[in-house]
Image (spheres, rainbow, N blue to C red):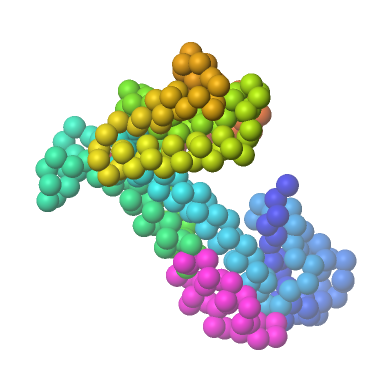
Amino acid sequence: ESHMKLLGCKGTTGTQESFMKLFKDEEKVKQIDGKIAEKMGFDKVFGVSGQTYTRKVDSRVLNVLASIAESASKFANDMRLLQHEKELEEPFEKSQIGSSAMAYKRNPMRSERINSLSRHVIALKMDPSITAATQWLERTLDDSANKRICIPEAFLAVDSILILYGNISKNIVVYENVIRTNLMQELPFMATEEILMNAVLKGGDRQELHEKIRVHSMEAAKQVKQFGKPNDLIERIEKDESFGLTKEEIEKALNPSNLCGRAPHQVEEYIENTVNPVIQKYEDLIKDINVEVKV
C-alpha cells in the first residue's frame, strides 16, 4: 500500500473556500479531491493542509533515497577493501585505463563513484529536514528554491548509484584461490575457539587455556608482523602439553567447513525467503533495466 498522498485541490489556504463558493455544495467539493487524486494516480489525499502538502513528505522521500545511498556506499566500501586484498574485483573493460598516473593499476572507479555520489545524497538529506523544521505556521516560501535543487539532485544521483551498483553486482569477479590463500593464513587464529573448546572437553581449565592461547597468539602475530615469518600458532599449541590434544585433533579444527556454522544455509534461506520474493514482486519494473557502464 502506498504511503504517498496527493495534496488534492485545497485552494490558497487549504480550506477549499473558493470551491465552496463556486459549487455551493460541500459533498461535490469533497468529491473533487478524490477525483483529482484518481486522475493523478493516487488513492489518498491529505485530510488537512495549507496551500502545500506538509514538507515532512519531502523529508521522508529524501530519507528513503539516503537510505539507499547508505547501503550502496557500504557495499562499495567493502568492494574496495576486498579488491585491495585481490579477493574480488569490479568489472574492468578491455581498454579501460585503471589509473592515469600508474598504468598497472586497476582502480575500483565504479565503487569510488558510488561512494562519492552516496555522500552527496546523504548530505542532501539534511535540506528537506531543516526546511520542514523551520516552516512558519502553515507555510513560508523559503522552501521552494531549496526543494527544486535537492529533490531532483537526489533522484538523479541515486539513479546513477543504482546503475553502478547493478553493473558491479552483475559482473563482479571472484578470485577463489586468493580467498583460499588469505583464509588459510588467518585460519590458525580463527580456529583458536574450536581448539579451546576441544581442550576443555578433555578436562582442561578454560581460563588457564584461554590465557595460554592469548600468549601464543600474540607471539605468533609478532613473528608474522615484525619478522615476516609464517604463522606458527598451531605448532606452538601442539608443543604445549597443557592442551592435551593430539596433532590430528588440532589439525581437524583447522578445517574451514567446521568453522562456518549455518552460514551456507543462512545464505540460501535469505535468498529464497527474502531476496527472491522482492525480485518477483518487482520483476516487471527491473527486467529491462540497463546497467551497462561505458568507461
Of the pair 176 and 210, the residue shown nearer to us:
210
Span shown in magenta: 123-149
Q: Where residue 5 sits in the image (x, y, percent)?
A: 70, 60
Classify residue 135 by image quadrant.
bottom right
Q: Residue furthest top?
A: 248
Say whether residue 126 is magenta: yes
Q: Residue furthest front?
A: 241
Classify residue 273 by image quadrant.
top right
Q: Is residue 266 left or right of residue 293?
A: right
Secondary structure mainly formed by the magenta segment: helix
Q: Where residue 45 sits in the image (x, y, percent)?
A: 74, 62
Of the pair 197 and 108, the residue shown nearer to us:
197
Q: Where residue 288 sits in the image (x, y, percent)?
A: 46, 33
Residue at image coords 57%, 76% = 130
Of the pair 240 and 74, the residue shown nearer to us:
240
Say whether residue 158 is magenta: no
Residue 279 in sight here: no
Residue 71 in sight here: yes
Residue at image coords 22%, 41% = 106
Q: Is residue 73 shown above or below 56?
A: above
Q: Is residue 271 shown above or below 214?
A: above
Residue at image coords 27%, 34% = 229
Residue at image coords 66%, 52% = 41
Count the numbered circles shown.
0
Q: Where residue 69 sits in the image (x, y, percent)?
A: 48, 53
Of the pair 142 and 84, the residue shown nearer to us:
84
Q: Is residue 233 shown above or below 163?
A: above
Quadrant location of the C terminus in the rendered image: top left
